[in-house]
Image (cartoon, grey):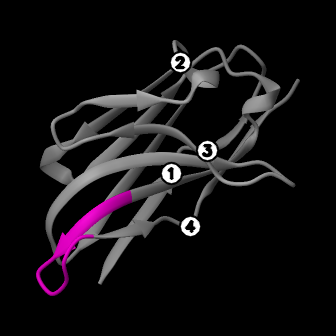
Amino acid sequence: QVQLVESGGGLVQPGGSLRLSCAASGSISRIAAMAWYRQAPGQQRGLVAHITSGSATNYADSVKGRFTISRGYANNTVHLQMNSLKPEDTAVYYCAANIRTYYNNFRDYWGQGTQVTVSS
């Protein structure tokens, strides 16, 4: 059993910052890539940022230069530092991870999501 739990969402004014965190727990043998996705009302879920086990990163064009993804390897965490937030960043943000457990091969796991609202 694996759980991903996100934290750090909330309401922020345009131009402000938020830091999202996600902690993976359970019978984890190894974590490969981790990522953040987001879904705004009426839109499909899309990739925001991705980080490999070797710390290579990839970002959606809309967040490049404003968001930074990082990993905490010691405690199976991933973070998303979001700066210069815009109203169009408003969405539910989901953590995802490709995990091998002691019982199963690698598969994708998802968190429940955390709401980020950017509004004055």
The quadrant where residue 68 appears: top left
| Residue 24 placement, left or right of 27 | right
Q: Which badge, 1 or 4, is on the more N-terminal residue?
A: 1
Neighbor class of circle 2 (other Cα within 10 Å; few <14, some 14-19, many 20+) is: few
Dot in front, 4 or 2? 2
CA gap, disc 1 and disc 4: 10 Å
Q: Which badge, 4 or 3, is on the more N-terminal residue?
A: 3
Q: Which badge, 4 or 2, is on the more N-terminal residue?
A: 2
| Residue 56 placement, left or right of 35 | left
Neighbor class of circle 1 (other Cα within 10 Å; few <14, some 14-19, many 20+) is: some
- The residue singled out by tag 3 in the image is 9
Give the residues drawn in magenta, as a range: 97-106
- If the image is split into quadrants, where does the C terminus sit? top right
- If the image is split into quadrants, where does the N terminus sit? bottom left
Q: Which badge, 2 or 3, is on the more N-terminal residue?
A: 3
- The residue singled out by tag 1 in the image is 7
Q: Residue at x 64, y 23 (%)?
A: 62
Q: On screen, 119 above or below 28?
A: above
Q: Residue at x 85, y 29 (%)?
A: 119
The image shows residue 13 at horizontal and vertical percentages of 78, 23
Q: On screen, 20 above or below 25?
A: above
**Numbered circles on residues, count:** 4
Q: Nearer the viewer, residue 73 or 50?
A: 50
